[in-house]
Image: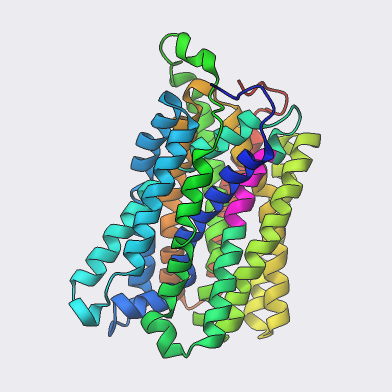
């Protein structure tokens, strides 16, 4: 029986949010340990970090495919089955990557196997966002869709924080050699221990796909929603590039600023915590004042401060300046980017919501999320300028702000 339109127990909301966070923990842990993973699978190459980041980006290639199949499952059979399938596949990929032998042990087969599990991770995660966000929107009480949808982003950012905490603990308890040889695997296996729990709690979910959708004939045509897809894709491109440049702060601190591993992993904790807090604030503000004003105001402020912040971080070799600048950027990212996914999800009818949101999100993320860290590192090597991340974000912000200015307000629109 569908639970859409009636109050859901909070444990069901918690189950969706926690499962979403666990899947993203698995995915972003790779980015956090990109240096160590590069040393494991690409030893001896001067481009080992670049190759590691390319493998990280490869996980995004499969996301549109997963978004299509698992997202459609969410529209045809319900949000619950789609969420269970995506989580189970992520568990398999997580354990497989953690247990893949090193290049020194099995040679070229090692990076090939790692790449295969990375692609499976991408497939699983590609089908996660649409059903999860659709579930939260449909379960939200009147006037709280923005806040409920912000839980999706909040759980993603808390997963970044958890990955950073694990990184700090491991970097402070293991030698650099041990961290590179096997310590990074612990971070993945810790996530794997949660997989059985995640499957159990997701099996208890009530369905939110409205029952009426099964009796309404064929699904609505997609053409009327092309504008939503284009504008939403541009907004997501902006948020994705900003988010993954900020996630790159761990590698930026290690590789460019030459800080120690503990400071670099501390940046990941700060990033996740600050962004998660302001994701929720953004959701509440967007319910009160609308999606569009909140996106425009805070992303405009982001444009104004990003270059000075990176200049200060690069030219004042201070941990306090680095952390302070990063915190400011993460706050603006959380405030400005939070309403984007809400706007897309409530702009699309329930009968195609899971699949459409999944595809729009996955295509934007796969193209720009997968390439951002690789591109930033490549441009840093090419130009030698530590301001490359700032210029890269500024370009994305201009695109995002243009799309936001063209968007219609959706805060009063029905979610059914």
What residue is drawn where x is 38% and y is 74%? 37
Q: Where in the figure is residue 256, as x and y percent of width and height? A: 52, 80
Q: Residue furthest right?
A: 288
Q: Where in the figure is residue 396, as x and y percent of width and height? A: 55, 52
100 to 347, vertically: above or below: below
Which sits in the foreground, 381 or 414? Answer: 414
Q: Seen in the image, is 282 located left or right of residue 248?
A: right
Q: Which residues are magenta?
A: 148-157
403 to 261, vertically: above or below: above
What residue is drawn where x is 40% and y is 73%? 185
Which sits in the foreground, 376 or 280? Answer: 280
Q: Seen in the image, is 357 located left or right of residue 50?
A: right
Q: In what quadrant of the picture does the C terminus appear? A: top right
Which sits in the foreground, 368 or 399? Answer: 368
What residue is drawn where x is 59% and y is 40%? 341
Q: How many tags in the picture?
A: 0
Q: Seen in the image, is 86 located left or right of residue 357?
A: left
Q: Where in the figure is residue 267, as x and y percent of width and height? A: 62, 73
317 to 286, vertically: above or below: below
Which sits in the foreground, 167 or 357? Answer: 167
Residue 311 visible in the current orientation: yes
Q: Quadrant of residue 272?
A: bottom right
What residue is drawn where x is 49% and y is 87%? 174
């Amino acid at each position: 029986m569908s639970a859409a339109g009636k109050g859901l127990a909070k444990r069901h909301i918690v189950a969706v949010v926690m499962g979403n966070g666990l899947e993203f923990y698995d995915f972003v842990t790779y980015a956090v340990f990109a240096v160590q993973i590069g040393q494991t699978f690409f030893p001896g190459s001067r481009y080992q970090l670049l190759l590691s980041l390319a493998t990280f980006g490869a996980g995004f290639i499969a996301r549109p495919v997963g978004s299509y199949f698992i997202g459609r499952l969410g529209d045809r059979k319900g949000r619950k089955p789609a969420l269970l399938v995506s989580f189970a596949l992520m568990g398999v990929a997580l354990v497989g990557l953690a247990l893949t032998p090193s290049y020194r042990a099995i040679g070229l087969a090692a990076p090939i196997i790692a790449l295969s599990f990375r692609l499976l991770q991408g497939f699983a995660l590609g089908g996660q966002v649409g059903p999860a966000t659709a579930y939260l929107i449909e379960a939200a009480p009147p006037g709280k869709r923005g806040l409920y949808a912000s839980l999706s982003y909040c759980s993603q950012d808390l997963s970044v924080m958890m990955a950073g905490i694990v990184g700090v603990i491991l970097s402070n308890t293991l030698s650099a050699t041990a961290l590179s040889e096997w310590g990074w695997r612990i971070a993945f296996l810790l996530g794997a221990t949660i997989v059985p729990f995640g499957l159990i709690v997701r099996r208890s979910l009530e369905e939110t796909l409205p029952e009426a959708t099964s009796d309404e004939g064929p699904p609505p045509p997609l053409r009327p929603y092309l504008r939503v897809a284009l504008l939403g894709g541009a907004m997501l491109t902006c948020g994705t590039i900003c988010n993954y440049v900020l996630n790159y702060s761990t590698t930026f601190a290690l590789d460019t600023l030459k800080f120690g591993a503990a400071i670099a992993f501390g940046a990941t904790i700060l990033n996740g915590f600050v962004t998660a807090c302001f994701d929720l604030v953004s959701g509440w503000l967007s319910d009160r004042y609308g999606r569009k004003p909140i996106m425009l105001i805070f992303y405009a402020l982001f444009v104004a401060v990003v270059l000075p912040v990176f200049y200060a971080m690069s030219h004042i070799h201070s941990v306090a300046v680095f952390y302070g600048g990063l915190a400011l950027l993460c706050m603006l990212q959380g405030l400005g980017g939070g309403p984007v996914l809400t706007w897309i999800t409530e702009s699309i009818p329930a009968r195609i919501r899971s699949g459409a949101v999944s595809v729009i999100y996955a295509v934007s993320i796969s193209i720009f999320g997968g390439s951002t860290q690789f591109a930033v590192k490549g441009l840093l090597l090419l130009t030698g300028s530590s301001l490359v991340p700032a210029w890269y974000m500024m370009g994305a912000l201009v695109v995002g702000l243009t799309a936001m200015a063209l968007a219609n307000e959706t805060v009063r629109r029905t979610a059914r």
